[in-house]
Image (cartoon, helix red, strand yellow):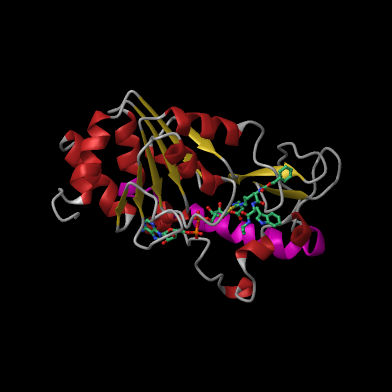
Amino acid sequence: MTPDGPPPIEAAAAALRRARRVVVLTGAGVSAESGVPTFRDALTGLWSRYRAEDLATPQAFLANPKLVWDWYAARREKLAQVEPNDGHRALARLEALVDDLLVVTQNVDGLHHRAGSRNVLELHGRLDRTLCFREGTESEPDPSDTGTPPRCPRCGAHLRPGVVWFGEALPAGAFDRACEAAAAADLCLSVGTSGLVEPAASIPRVALGNGVPVIEVNPDATPLTASATWHLRGASGVVLPQLVELAFGSS
Ligand code: BV8
């Protein structure tokens, strides 16, 4: 709380109540309360001696296709056991309460869609999609193919997870669309992201550079915290429902 102002969450809720166009950047932290490990969480098991950034690259896949494929297969299996949390649901509720809400997510888990959000821009692809490594197009393995990785039924190249690896370009136009929306918004939220991965991390800065206020929701400080208009310290599964309820009343 500033010395003579309302608590940050009340000021942030007032801004949300006035906003017509809202852009929300989410990162791995928004899925943490669903039990999906964040990227900063140490990798476990077979992969405990690797950093995520070292495995999530085309070079790592070319060097050791099985190791990288098995890491993604294990993450995909875990995804089948998790559910969206109250933070995802608060954003899905918010979409019906403002004129125009765009969720721009770095996450590959599909949980925003499962929570009911419809206007979602996935910057880094989807864990549950599979591509032909050679063509880059969607391709599913033949059910009889138990290889790890399996082969593309069309051309025989390895299949790969449908995510954007480090060193790879984001989906065509996705980043430009996110920046245009952030620049034209009345309010931007940055939720559950360490702000270390580019170009996604620059989206809240684009908002600020265009005079758009930014609410950051994170239990920790990040490189954005000092310049955010409000920093709401806490878990998104707790803070987002509070913020939406303060702004619009209970569901
Ligand atoms: C690109 C899919 C250009 C894969 C991901 C040197 C060489 C090459 C590139 C670079 C370089 N230096 C910089 C770069 C750019 C690089 C980059 O940013 N590197 C980093 C490591 C420095 N970026 C890229 O390569 C991008 N592409 O630049 O292309 C180009 C252009 C044209 C042609 C060719 C190339 C592509 C980046 C995409 C990488 N793929 N995911 C996979 O999932 O395996 S990114 C990956 O990182 C995830 O998507 C994840 O979302 C993201 C990590 O960020 P966060 O989401 O913030 O997660 P993190 O764990 O870091 O933080 C969690 C936060 O939540 C924390 O702050 C924590 O406090 C908070 N939290 C925890 N609990 C909660 C919570 N918050 C709220 N509530 C809670 N309960």
Picture residue at 79% right of the left edge, 44% below the top: 152
Q: Is residue 106 visible?
A: no
Give residue 149's quadrant in the image.
bottom right
Count of numbered circles in the view: 0
* Quadrant hosting residue 233: bottom left
Which residues, given as a range, are shown in magenta? 62-87
Q: Residue at x 64, y 76 (%)?
A: 49
| Residue 102 on image: x %, y % | 43, 32
User: Considering the image in quadrants, where does the N terminus appear?
Assistant: bottom left
Left or right placement of residue 186 versus residue 129 in this view? left
Q: Is residue 76 magenta?
A: yes
As for residue 141 lying within the magenta part, the answer is no
User: Relative to the observer, which residue lies in front, 90 or 204?
Assistant: 204
Q: Quadrant of ligand 1?
A: bottom right
| Secondary structure mostly seen in the magenta stretch | helix
Query: What residue is at 47 percent from the left and 54 percent from the top?
Result: 28
Instruction: Point out the residue furthest to the bottom here.
Output: 49
Whether residue 83 appears in this view of the structure is yes
- Which residue is drawn at the image coordinates 27% and 28% (left, top)? 97
In the displayed structure image, the side of residue 245 where residue 44 appears, left or right: right
Q: Nearer the viewer, residue 109 or 27?
A: 27
Task: Tell me where residue 221 appears, x and y as whole percent.
Answer: 39, 62
Question: Is the residue 206 above or below the residue 239 in the image?
Answer: above
Q: Position of residue 15 (x, y in %)?
A: 25, 36
Which quadrant is home to the C terminus?
Answer: top left
Q: Position of residue 241 (x, y in %)?
A: 25, 45
